[in-house]
Image (cartoon, helix red, strand yellow):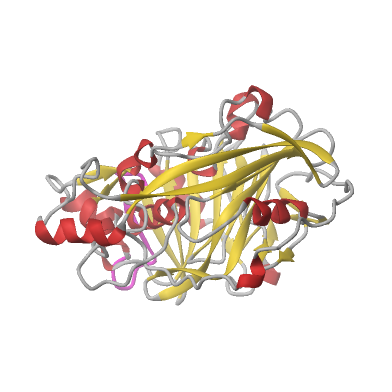
Amino acid sequence: MSYRIQDVLDSVRDGAPAPRTSTTDIIVAAHRLRSRRRWAAAAGAGGAAVVTLAVVTGIAGAVPRASIPQPPAAATPSTSPPPVTARDFTQPEGLGFTIAQTRVGVWQIGPAGRATLGYQQIPVYRDGKTLTVDNVAYPYPDGLLTLYRPGVFDIATSSTFPSQWPKQYRTTYSQRTDVVIAGRPGIEQQFTYQLPILEDLRAKKKANPGPPRLDDPSIKTETFTRTAFAWKFDGTSWATFVPGPNREPLSRTESLAIVEAVAPGKPEPARVPYTFGWLPAGWSVSAAELSPTDIISGVLLNPVKLSGTTLDRQFDEYPAAGRLTIWQGRPKPNNAPAEGQTMKCQDINGYCTLLIDRDHFAQFERVGKTLSMDDVRHILRELRFTTVADRDSWKPVPTA
């Protein structure tokens, strides 16, 4: 994946407020930029400078603008909490969630985020931490809890915790240590990473207009340390908590309190604001995403049932022959259907945009060429939408 560098560097400018953002913020912001501006790139990006995702994430903190107040002093416990006894968890049937929405200190576990055939993934939000997109502030997570299905992931055979760590962070890892989490066996591992000092990055850009050299050794950096945890949450299957590479404090004690607070909840299917009127024979949804941001819903479609080593991949790398995303808002002008039309497609890039109502639109991305563009149009035209703004009207995701 690649992105226009100007899109992701606009906020690195003299006088801009010093943002505090995570790698995840930048990955998602870049994904939004790609999705909403794809038409412009297809139409005339020709010789425009682009950067890969690894380079985009190397300017951590540059975008997007976020407002993140410091947590109150009471957020850091002065003593270790009492041990938590083992809890009885169940695995979801189909694409769904079985973890309760819970609070601990200034953090909120959930609501649910992603459900795949290999795991359920739950964001952990810090009070007041937001990501601003198109002048709207959305809650954004400090880290991710991932609860795997049996046999999908084994930390003992994995060299690192499952996360995306670009080389630009110069990350180092400690030795793993055995630990008991909520009455279950687990491990912990500290990682130390470097982020550029934003004031220095802006000063370099002011002195030398144009894309900064992110590998420039003269750019000053600061060092941060976080603790990741893995434990057998249901006695058999592994769960992980991996903090994002943020700038605000998150101690080992606070991270441990978060994982100790994970609790079973009422099983809930992943839901979408539509039903499929048509899919090619044999096709089904293999992963679903629900979000409190402008990307309110997303599903990944495949012609075969996934299995084996593909099931533990991160959501943005999960196998898919098609991606259907529902957005809140209006498509960008370059991406919008013509006056009086409801759909616009770019066949050469495998994209279609469909207007749903005044406040929502759908976008389908063909991955590879398993689907024809006629198939893409057919899928979109046959969608039967609920009242998108009313999440209680959403329907369980069909998986077969």
Residue closest to the far top: 157
Q: Residue at x 20, y 45 (%)?
A: 218
Seen in the picture, residue 226 relative to 148 is either above or below; the reply is below
Q: Residue 285 sits in which quadrant? A: top right
Q: Residue at x 55, y 42 (%)?
A: 301
Q: Is residue 39 visible?
A: yes
For the stretch drawn in magenta, the main secondary structure is: loop
**Can you give x and y, in whole percent of width and height, for residue 21 in the image?**
42, 60
Q: Is residue 58 left or right of residue 15?
A: right
In magenta, the rendered stretch is 337-350
User: Foreground residue, 154 or 317?
Assistant: 154
The N terminus - image quarter: top left
Residue closest to the far front: 78
Residue 76 in magenta stretch:
no
User: Foreground residue, 192 or 52?
Assistant: 192
Q: Residue 161 sits in which quadrant? A: top right
Image mark count:
0
The C terminus - image quarter: top right
User: Foreground residue, 70 or 317?
Assistant: 70
Q: Residue at x 19, y 45 (%)?
A: 213
Seen in the picture, residue 79 relative to 46 is either above or below; the reply is below
Q: Residue 339 sits in which quadrant? A: bottom left
Q: Is residue 396 left or right of residue 139?
A: right
Seen in the picture, residue 7 relative to 232 is either above or below; the reply is below
Q: Is residue 274 visible?
A: no
User: Foreground residue, 178 or 23?
Assistant: 178
**Can you give x and y, in whole percent of width and height, for residue 219 in the image?**
24, 49
**Can you give x and y, in whole percent of width and height, for residue 379 in the image?**
51, 50
Residue 339 in magenta stretch:
yes
**Can you give x and y, in whole percent of width and height, for residue 375 in the image?**
46, 44
